[in-house]
Image (spheres, grey):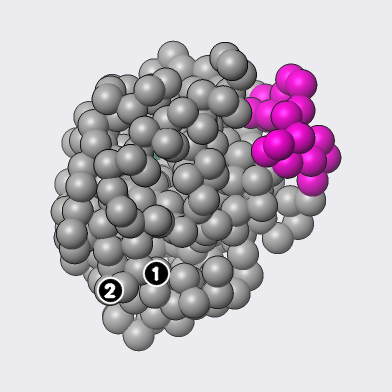
Amino acid sequence: MSDTYSKAQTAADFILAKTTLRPRIGVVLGSGLGSFADELADPIAIPFQEIPGFPRSTAEGHAGRLVIGNVGNVAIAAMQGRVHLYEGYKFEDVIFPMRVMGRMGIKGTVLTNAAGGISEKLEQGCLVILNDHINLQGANPLVGPNDSRFGLRFFDMGNAYHPPWRQLALREATRIGINVHEGVYVAVPGPSYETPAEIRAFRVLGGDVVGMSTVPEVIAARHMEIKVLAISCVTNLAAGIGSDPLNHQEVLEVGMRVRDGFVALLKAVIPQMAAEL
Ligand code: HPA
């Protein structure tokens, strides 16, 4: 009973025993973007360390709790914070929360992150609706034996970022008046920020934003046929584009600055996403 599937089931049962809500959408809130979970109605919050098998978030700006509550009349589970490879976690730990959400019955996910802007059209504080990714984290989180209870050994990633939800998010962001774009996310392991030469290379490859998370969760979600919407907040221009040295404080501050628009966007899209599930 020590396989990941059983562990994820145990964690899911533990969480669902604490609430009568049955969330169908799971949200992961990245660096500086956690405040959305504070606005849920009828919330219950569970610290990650209380959930059996859950990894603990050590990154500053990540509260490290799971909040279950309502957006309008849609029940969601929102993770305030996530764990990253650069903290020393294995891929298995990084995707465990997504596995748990799958066992909780979640059918759609919104993954958010702070990212550096590579594309020239991006400015600090704008949002990017991801339409694809390039995985430069060194491996795929699903290497190893496949557990067919989660999904297929080989599966399509052609429309990993659910096209109708991309359109929905772009439309709602524009309506709200948010500076919004679409783009490709390049995932690196971190923790150092990139060099200017790396950023020039990523631009040639077709990357628009760069960050240290999200892609393992997208892959795990698609393995379970969970639909994905992913949103980057451009907290800084990537290395060599702006003139300032990069720092995590700036990442957190810009997250705070976009807070209201970001919360409004999630509140607008989630009920419409739920209508499709
Ligand atoms: N690079 C990688 N990860 C990031 C960045 C960046 O410039 N900004 C926020 N997360």
**Amino acid type shown at disc 1:** Ile
User: As drawn, is 125 to the left or to the right of 277?
Assistant: left
In terms of secondary structure, what is the magenta stretch mainly?
A: loop
Residue 43 sits above or below residue 262 on the image: above
Q: Secondary structure at mark 2?
A: loop
Near-viewer residue (2 or 84): 2
Residue 145 sits above or below residue 266 on the image: above
In the rendered image, residue 147 lying in the magenta stretch gets the answer: yes
Dots 1, 2 in contact, CB < 8 A: yes
Q: To which quarter of the image does residue 58 belong?
A: top left
In the rendered image, residue 116 lying in the magenta stretch gets the answer: no
Which residue is at 69% across, 29% downward?
A: 142
Which residue is at 44% across, 58% downward?
A: 25
Coordinates of residue 94 in the picture (x, y in percent)? 49, 28
Q: Quadrant of the C terminus?
A: bottom right
According to the picture, the residue beneath numbered tag 2 turns out to be 72
User: As drawn, is 81 to the left or to the right of 23?
Assistant: left
Residue 110 sits above or below residue 251 on the image: below
Q: Which mark is residue 270?
A: 1
**Amino acid type shown at disc 2:** Gly
